[in-house]
Image (spheres, rainbow, N blue to C red):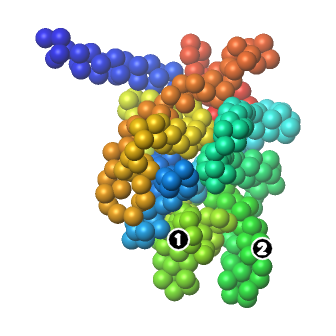
Amino acid sequence: MTDSTTPRRLRAAVRHAAARVDAATPAHRDRTVDALRAGAILGVVLGHWLVTALVKDGRTLHTASPLQHLPWLAPVSWVFQTLAVFFLVGGHVATRGYALARARGVPYHRWLRGRLARLFGPVAAVLTLWAAVTVALLLSGADLTTTRALVKLALSPLWFLLVFAVLTAATPLLTRLHPLWPLAVVLHVDLLRFGLGAPSWLGWTNLAAGWLVPYTLGAAWARGELERRRSGWILLVGGTAATAALVAWAGYPASMVGVPGAPVSNLDPPTLAAVTFGLAQCGLALLLRDRLRGAMRRPVAWAAVALVNLSAMTVFLWHQTALMATTATGLLTGRRLPGLHTVPDDLVWVAARLAWLPVLTLALALCWSAFRSRERGRGRHGGRRGGRRERSRVVRHHRPPTTESANGVPRV
């Protein structure tokens, strides 16, 4: 009887906890936005775990990708490269939040400080840990190639935060900018680079302009300009057609993520193909709003989304560390474990990596448990800022909702 009642009690406990989260959520909160943000974060995490390998070669570890050896797997990157959706949501949330802050008389510097504090709060722990790991590796005589590969992989998510922070700071100037303007910049930069032989460094202009396209789309969404389903269809069909044409006839890579050793990367820096692909993703996200709105009425589904949103930056910043921690632990066996240390050049590696996903998830859960307080504002101040306890922006406990958050911005 015990065996049969335990799963039932577990399900009941999950439903009860989910119901409490559902009841504690402000009625006015747009759960669709949180669902899109959670999907974008999980897409990036799974994408990195599926296309990043740390191959053991003697005493050296170096990064590799199954997309190097199995280019027909490029469609995997179309599913999991979801950064455009994150910038779409970011532009939407920042535009609404800034408008609400202005309406309540909150000065720009205070609004921005609140936004950046939540964005960069967990970063210090990552930098501290990896500074210590780097020193330990160098003192132990570790190969410089290995050290460089590990540090680069661990800190690679920080480029995203820097770009996102710059666009957030510029929100007051961007709220009325039409997405066609940054799209035109990307088009002309690529034309100069690939068509007229301009220096390759010119492409870094697209690092801001490329992600400005979905960010300004998010601002347009916040202004109510993308409510009609036709807008979503135009973005989806137009973006898909443009991306297909660029890949088929203009020589752009089919993979929407960087591939080690490839002459051109669609992300490093962003190319026109990455931006048009992002337009298609944004269109699909807009078309899915009604379905997501219905799904988020289910307490269990909403509780899962709320949990991801509460720790979005922690998950994003530590998922590569979880991968490397699992890889390093596997090295203690003295064997090259398939899907972990072997060359990703066949479907056996892909199957083995899929089997490792639960272990990587467990490693990430341990990182989340250790460092989530940095994102929730507790840390060394014992859970208080300015003399009061920091509360969740996603759910609230024991008090009725009045405004969207302390400064008008949901937690990122």
Please tell me how crowded label 2 is: few (under 14), some (14-19), or many (20+) other residues with Cα within 10 Å. Answer: few
Which residue is painted at 13% across and 11% down in the image? Answer: 1
Which residue is painted at 30% across and 19% down in the image? Answer: 10
Label ID, residue 176: none
Which residue is painted at 53% across and 75% down in the image? Answer: 253
Residues 333 and 341: in front is 333
Label ID, residue 239: 1
Residues 108 and 306: in front is 306
Of tags 2 and 1, which is closer to the observer?
2
| Residue 341 horizontal side relative to residue 209, left or right | left
Element type at marker 1? helix
Classify 249 as above or below 373: below
**Where is residue 66 shown, x and y percent of the image?**
44, 62
Question: Does residue 136 appear in this view?
Answer: yes
State the separation of the CA atoms marked 2 and 1: 24 Å
**Where is residue 385 shown, x and y percent of the image?**
76, 19
Please tell me how crowded label 1 is: few (under 14), some (14-19), or many (20+) other residues with Cα within 10 Å. Answer: many
Q: Which residue lies under the disc numbered 2?
A: 202
Element type at marker 2? helix
Residue 260: quarter of image: bottom right
